[in-house]
Structure formats: structure tokens, C-alpha cells
Amino acid sequence: MTLIRRTFYLFIGLTFPAFWISHASGWGAFLYQPIQQLFATTAAGWPSFLTTCLLYLLAILCFEGLHRLLQSTRP
């Protein structure tokens, strides 16, 4: 299980910059457009960074929850 966990975090770390760049270029712009409207800005860099961080945080929380659930069920 340790190998799976380390591989997951390696994957997360290596894909974050590429996902942020693709997200800032307009893919999934509907996620950060409310932030742009709230702060009345046309910048796509920091709103997409916030939403990318939130998406990755959600993925990490789901993975850790599953990991701890599986870890507690094993004797």
C-alpha cells in the first residue's frame, strides 16, 4: 500500500503544473469564472490556480480517506 500511496503523490506532484497550465488556458474555465466575476478581473492565472489547488486537494482528501478506510479494515 505504501508503494501505491507514494506513486499517487508522485503523480499528483508531476501533473499539477501541466493541469494548471491547461486549466488556465481555458479548459474548465467555468470553474474559475465565478472567481473572476467576484473580483472583477480578466486574469486567468490566479483564479485557475485556486481552483486547481481545490481540485487537487479534493483528490488528495478522497485518496487519503480511502487509504485510511482500507487501512482500518485490515487486521
Image: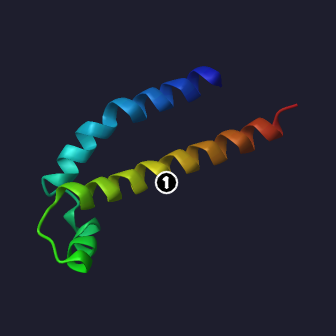
Which percent across, then down, holds residue 14? 34, 29
Residue 55 drawn at (x, y percent): 40, 54
Q: Quadrant of residue 6?
A: top right
Indicate the quadrant containing the C terminus: top left, top right, bottom left or bottom right. Answer: top right
- Relative to 45, residue 63 above or below: above
* Residue 18 left/right relative to 41: right
Q: For this rendering, which residue is in front, 40 or 27?
A: 40
Viewport quadrant of the N terminus: top right
Identify the amino acid type marked 1: Leu
Which residue sits at x=38%, y=51%? 53
Identified at 23% across, 60% down, the residue is 28
Residue at image x 18%, y 53%? Answer: 24
| Extreme residue in the right direction | 75
- Write the residue at 57% across / 50% down: 62
Q: Which residue is mark 1?
A: 58
Q: Residues within 10 Å of mark 1 (few under 14, many from 20)?
A: few
Residue 63 placement: quadrant: top right
